[in-house]
Image: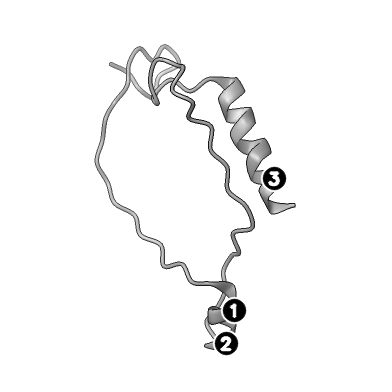
Amino acid sequence: MRPFDTDADGTLIGEGIGMLALRRLEDAERDGNKIYAVIRGIGSASDGRHKSIYAPAASGQHLAIRRAYEDAD
């Protein structure tokens, strides 16, 4: 398997961890927290019709982005 090669031929499963501390905007402003970003919309497009989450379809990715932009106005 060569996951980072131009001739990649498989999926490499790895482990990791990440953490975000999210607060409601009005609470962060009230408490004087430094605000790095504001999430204005989210979108997803997992309809279960494709082979796996490791092989997303371009149409599904387009749908997710469109939903996020619509949600954010």
Task: Residue type at mark 3: give it.
Answer: Tyr
* Helix, strand or loop for disc 1: helix
The numbered mark at residue 26 is 1
Q: Residue 58: x percent and y percent?
A: 58, 21
The residue located at (60%, 64%) in the rendering is 38
Residue under numbered circle 3: 69
| Quadrant in which residue 7 is drawn | top left
* Helix, strand or loop for disc 3: helix
The residue located at (38%, 20%) in the rendering is 52
Task: Residue type at mark 1: give it.
Answer: Glu
Q: Residue 40: x percent and y percent?
A: 64, 58
Question: Which residue appears farthest toward the right when viewing the image?
Answer: 73
Dot 3 alpha-carbon crowd within 10 angstroms: few under 14, some 14 to 19, many 20 or more: few
CB under 8 Å between discs 2 and 1: yes
Q: Residue 45: x percent and y percent?
A: 53, 32
The numbered mark at residue 30 is 2
The mark that comes first in sequence, 3 or 1, is 1
